[in-house]
Amino acid sequence: MTFEEKLKNKEYELIWQEYCGFLDLTIEEYMTIQNRLLKEQIDLWCVSPLGQKITGGRRPATIEEFRNMVPLTTYDDYADVLLMKKEEMLPEKPIIWIQTTWEGGKHPIKTAPYTKGMLKTYKTNVLACMILSTSSKKGEFDIEPGDTFLYALAPLPYTTGLIPLGLKDEISVEFLPPVSEAVNMTFSERNKRGFKMGMKKGIDFFFGLGSVAYYVSLSVAAMSEGGKSGSKLKKMMSMSPDMVLRYLKAKKQCRRENRDLKPKDLFTLKGFVCAGTDNRCYKDDLEDLWGVRPIEVFSGTEPSCIGIETWSRNGLYFFPDTCFYEFIPEEEMRRNMEDPTYRPRTLLMDEVQPGEVYEIVLTVLKGGAFARYRVGDMYRCLGLTSREDETRIPRFEYIDRVPDIIDIAGFTRISKNSIENVIQLSGLGIQDWTALKEFTPDKGRPYLHLYVELTPEAAVHSAVSREILKEHLTIYFKYVDQDYHDLKRILGMDPLKVTVLKCGTFARYREYRGKQLRRINPDIHDVKEMVRMQEELYMQRRHQR
């Protein structure tokens, strides 16, 4: 029976239990599901050529042996198999391959296989996300056949392209614009077409990256306005009678309040879902624009859809049937970053502690390719239970990517390697540098702050200003990293800030502190200390003159 048939039969309690019943689990019941599914996955993965390659031919018999025998992995461990799509080496035959950016300037893409079992779980959990996005309390939701869904998603082969595919056989949802049209449109064309259709039919669901959702939302007023009276009349003629009335009422209200038109003046969303990184930077503004606070979901190319918030919007709960979860404590992760030969210990879901920060490690279930996989994301445990949600399993908040990656608004994956490539290609005479992710003081928007020191020759013989450095580096970042280019092209963001330090500043810091500053995301206090040192260095040299 499809989801739509269950709705028509008014089996609301059964629907809630089937899709959101995991929220009622005790931690013991949760771990029983985790352990059972992992044992099934061990039997598939460890006998596959891929599993044998990673384990060196050994076959663990228990979960404990699996965790001891299988090393923590990264995409490098799978690249030769997955990039060539060697299906004969996988635990189970994939139905579809999904892709995303790997690392700009070094590896263009990474691909991930999805099996029949993975797709079935994905479909179930996407429906759970839809249900919870419309819920105001436990057991209640508002979904109907024919609901409209604003298409602000990246199409296949990206992960979000699976959403229309997963819903197609379960419920008749009308995407705005239709998927068959959207996949052949540019980002801007999809937005305009989607909102134009929304002005006729209304918008019930909106799903997108937090940064993209914000950008799209800001364009609503512009697309709802008309420059000349004729264009306004034409636009109103294309609306439904209800929307014309709402539009006229909203314009009157906006004039009275002396403000711009907002999406909430025209549309009443049932469900608003945002994914990706840096969502906390956009949630308040999105709530103001739409009148509904977005519910956060976490999904990735390799693991699929793994977590969702509830009606309280106070933390993510991980689906127990998507992946087997392990957690590297933050101090263990940092020790491993300092010493790559150190093997960090991991905790299970029933061992995490409130307030602690962890790097997540995933074993994809249902025939997935990835085992004990470091996907590169960090979470903080918010609590082991919730009185508000009536839950008895841990909930988490997404923090950011791991410290050696700078992710801006869910678009970029800037690494030490990509910045070194940019500097080398630019030929700007930069001899030392460090980069970190910072946030604007006004809106809290993320950006890449690059602190650079020029060679003495470059500093003396070339009139390189901060603006020139920024302009040149921006050109090469766009060249090396297509996703960086898209930040400007799609979102209109300029994510780079450059600070030029005086010659000798980095060396002075190393001499004073006895350590090398991390290239990527060093401690902000260390950076501020180094910046203060350059002023001391300047005053010292001035005094010597």
Image: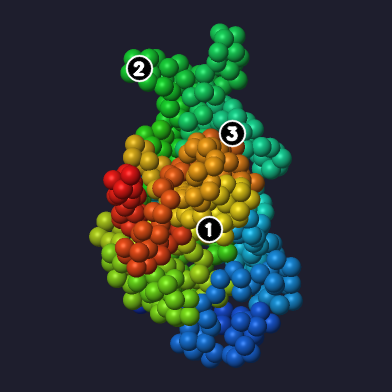
The quadrant of the image that shows the N terminus is bottom right
Name the amino acid, label 1.
Answer: Ser
- Residue depicted at 27% across the width and 56% down the height: 388
Residue 316 screen position, x and y as percent? 39, 58
Residue 159: quarter of image = bottom right
Circle 2 SS class: loop
Q: Position of residue 24 (x, y in %)?
A: 36, 66
- Decide: marks 2, 3 in contact (CB < 8 A)? no
Examine the rendering and report whether any part of residue 65 can be seen.
Answer: yes
Between residue 32 and residue 302, name the one nearer to us. Answer: 302
Q: Position of residue 408 (x, y in %)?
A: 48, 48
Query: SS class of the residue under badge 3?
Result: helix
Q: First in sequence, mark 2 or 1: give its number.
A: 2
Q: Residue shown at 68%/37% (left/top)? A: 185
Q: Nearer the viewer, residue 213 or 531?
A: 531
Mark closer to the observer (1, 3): 1
Q: Residue at x 64, y 64 (%)?
A: 112
Residue at (74, 76) in percent of width and height: 88
Residue 82, quarter of the rendered image: bottom right
Report the Cα–Cα distance between label 2 and label 1. Answer: 45 Å
Residue neighbourhood size for the residue with mark 2, other residues' Cα within 10 Å, grouped as few (<14), some (14–19), many (≥20): few
Determine whether label 2 and label 1 are within 8 Å by CB: no
Number of callouts: 3
Question: Image check: 278 left or right of 84?
Answer: left
Work out whether residue 53 or residue 533 is closer to the camera in this orientation and state it. 533
Three-letter amino acid code at disc 3?
A: Asn
At mark 1, the secondary structure is: loop
Query: On the image, numbered disc 1 is attached to which residue?
Result: 415
| Marks 1 & 3, CB-CB < 8 Å contact | no
Judge left or right: residue 130 versus residue 509: right
Residue position marked by numbered label 3 in the rendering: 191
List the residue tagged with mark 2: 258
